[in-house]
Image (cartoon, rainbow, N blue to C red):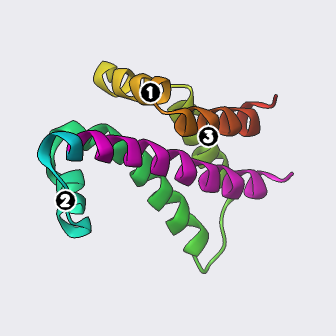
Amino acid sequence: MTNRELLRSGRDALLKLHKSLLDHERAIYEGINGPQTPGRFLQILLEDADFAWLRKFSTLIVEIDELFAQKDGISDEAIEANIAALRSLIAMEDEDEAFRAKYMSGLQKDLDAAAHQGDLRALLFGG
């Protein structure tokens, strides 16, 4: 698999992981605050500090999407930098302890998220 293919597959796997974590967090939020419309929940995601940790996933997904959307080609360095960013995120190398705590909690409480995390780790780190 080329690095370009690895990045594309990693992006797709990250999207699945993000969706699982997001669905889990939404269920908790709506259990406390009642049902939210999609538009209202999007606003909460973008503005509420409790959801800031999930924005690290969505930001990286958008950055990778923008990289692949470039019309003038993609440098090997840009691909490698984004693979490194994916690996760092999945390995929870972020110094933000609140991020790591929420990420770990999400993985422990949601089996789908844990499975997607495992798939992504296997893809990015081999085995």
Amino acid at dot 2: Gln
Front position among marks 3 and 1: 1
Residue 121, horizontal then vertical, whole percent: 68, 32
Considering every residue shown, the one lying at the far right of the view is: 1
SS label for mark 1: helix
Residue drawn at 47 percent across, 51 percent down: 19
SS label for mark 2: loop
Amino acid at dot 1: Lys
Q: Is residue 78 visible?
A: no
Asked whether, in this view, residue 60 is left or right of residue 16, the answer is left
Label 2–label 1 contact, CB within 8 A: no
Q: Which residues are magenta?
A: 1-29
Q: Quadrant of residue 25?
A: top left
Q: CA distance from mark 2 to mark 3?
A: 26 Å
Residue tagged 3: 116
SS label for mark 3: helix
Image label count: 3
Residue 106, horizontal then vertical, whole percent: 42, 30
Residue tagged 1: 109
Asked whether, in this view, residue 39 is left or right of residue 25, the answer is left
Amino acid at dot 3: His
Residue tagged 2: 36
Q: Earlier in the sequence, mark 2 or mark 1?
A: 2
Q: Which mark is residue 18?
A: none
Question: Which of 8 and 106 lies nearest the eye of the viewer?
Answer: 106
The rendered magenta stretch, by its main secondary structure, is classed as helix
Q: Residues within 10 Å of mark 1 (few under 14, many from 20)?
A: few
Q: CA distance from mark 2 to mark 1?
A: 22 Å
Q: Is residue 81 visible?
A: yes
Label 3–label 1 contact, CB within 8 A: no
